[in-house]
Structure formats: structure tokens, C-alpha cells
Amino acid sequence: MLGTYGLPTDVDAAPEWQSELLDLDAYLARIGYTGPRTPTVDTLHGVLRAHMGAITFENIDIALGRPVSIDLARIQDKLVRQGRGGYCYENNLLFAAALDRLGFPVTRLLARIRQGETRRRFRSHTVLLVRADDRVWLADAGYGYSGLMQALPLESGARAETGDWTWRLVADGPDWIVQIPHEDPAAAAAGAWYDMYAFRQEPQYRIDFEAAHYLSSTKPGSPFVGQVIAQRQEEKQRLLLLDKQLERRFPDGTAEVLRLSAADTVQVLRDAFGIALTDEDSRALLQFFAAK
């Protein structure tokens, strides 16, 4: 059930989300989470952190022109059983199903990516509002690079810190904006913040997710179409792979950029991003890079 302004008040048992199909034990084993299963904020932080550490943001299937489903059974097979990653719809719908099964009230939302800009884009990102310990929290397992490593309370000015990374949530009228300190060292030293994305407390339904997923995964010009992307937020570094270029960014604002061969890129996807690639996946990726 939803309370005022779309805030979650009870476990969402709507059949459209298919949460009953999730093998919770297999999911928790996949992410290496062995902690309590009670719906407390400590559990929320723990499961989110474990998910971020185990399941990479990646769009390999989209880049290769393969169909990508957001049916939970297909997501579970790919991300849990096959050891693959996925992009935001796959990651957050899987994470939300696990939270449903753990007894958390969850509201699924769509957000507008900003990437430091204020121009209005269509709602292409997914986020979750989760009730735990009598507060509402923002949780997001699907952003990848610079993604939240712990939940943020839904309060303007709220901050979360993991290692040397910081995130902030601010209210701007009806919009909630997730920010990180600006990645330009001079701007960061001046106290500037970088807008990652904005969302409103307007619950979205499966049909909304289907439409946004379709555009994100098929529309020419979408950043996920026609190029391989893998992203990972870690405690000591952020990793961003764009085709055959790997960027490592560190908390002090420094970065390393490496140009890779096609073969090295496939190996980096396995080793640095922890993606279980089959021989067929590897061959398809090598052919993809050879054709670019």
C-alpha cells in the first residue's frame, strides 16, 4: 500500500512485479549476503552494499542487439544464475523483489538523469523508496558508476558516506536530487555539487517501466545502444568502461584512462567487473569490436 505522496506503507504484493518468483536464498547467495533477514535499515544497507559489490551495471546484451527482458524470471536467470550483470531496470527490479520478500514496503519510481545538467530528459532511470525503522529511504542498486553504496533517508540535506565517497539528497520543489561532490577537483574544493539524477514521489507501474525500458534499450541515440558500457562503484575507486576505454576514478579526483585491445576488454569485463561471460559472449564481443 502507498501512503501520502506515494510513500510506501506496506509490502507491495502486486502480482505485476512477480516478486513471488524470486529464489531469495539464491539471490542472497549470489551477492554474498549472510546477515539478518529482518526488514530493518541495517539489513537494507547490508543487502544494497552486497548487491553493489557483486552485480555489475552492464549493457552487453543491448550492445550486441540481443533482446533484454524485464520479466523477473528472466532477470533472475541472467543476474543470479548466470552470473551476469544488467542495467538499471534489471538491477533495481531484482533488488526490489528481494526487498519485497524480506518484508520491506517498497515503491518503484522512475527518475530523470541529469549528469550535471538541468535540461529535462525522459524518465530513464529507476530508483526505490523503502520504509525501514519508521523512516523512508532512497535505495538504488542500478546506477553503477557513482551509485549509492548505502541508502539515503528521504530528507533534504541527507548525506551518506562510504569510504571517501559522499552522496547528498536535496529537495528542489517537487523534485528530489541525488548529488555527489563535483568530480572536477577545483569545483569540488569550492563546494560545488554534481547532480546525478532527479525524481518525484510519483509511483510508477510495470507498464511505465516497460515503456521506459523499451526506449532506453532500443532507441537510436540512447547511450545504451551501439556501445558496450560497464560501470562499478567500489570503496576505493569507480570504474567506467566505454567500449575499449577503461577509466578508473579515485576519491581525490584523479583518474586513469586506459585504451584496451578487444581481447583485453573482454578480459577486463571478466576480471575487473566480475561478469561471467560464456565463450559465445566473448566471440560476440570480439566481433562487435572488430566491426566498429
Image (cartoon, rainbow, N blue to C red):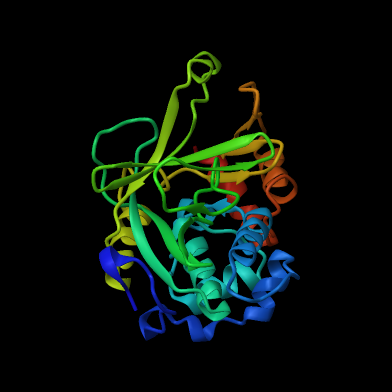
Q: Quadrant of residue 192?
A: top left
What residue is at 28 percent from the left and 46 percent from the top? Answer: 175
State whether residue 46 appears in this view. yes
> Is residue 200 toward the left or the right of residue 87 in the image?
left
Residue 129: % across, % down: 42, 62
Seen from the viewer's position, the closer of residues 288 and 131 is 131
What residue is at 55 percent from the left and 17 percent from the top? Answer: 185
Placement of 244 over or under 191, stated as above or below: below
Seen from the viewer's position, the closer of residues 284 and 235 is 235
Seen from the viewer's position, the closer of residues 193 and 16 is 193
Q: How many marks overall?
A: 0
> Is residue 38 toward the left or the right of residue 202 in the image?
right
> Is residue 74 toward the left or the right of residue 110 in the image?
right
Residue 14: % across, % down: 37, 83
> Is residue 33 toward the left or the right of residue 57 in the image?
right
Residue 87: % across, % down: 49, 55
Assign the N terminus to one quadrant of the image. bottom left
Placement of 66 over or under 157, stated as above or below: below
What residue is at 25 percent from the left and 34 percent from the top? Answer: 119
Residue 112: % across, % down: 32, 47
Seen from the viewer's position, the closer of residues 154 and 291 is 154
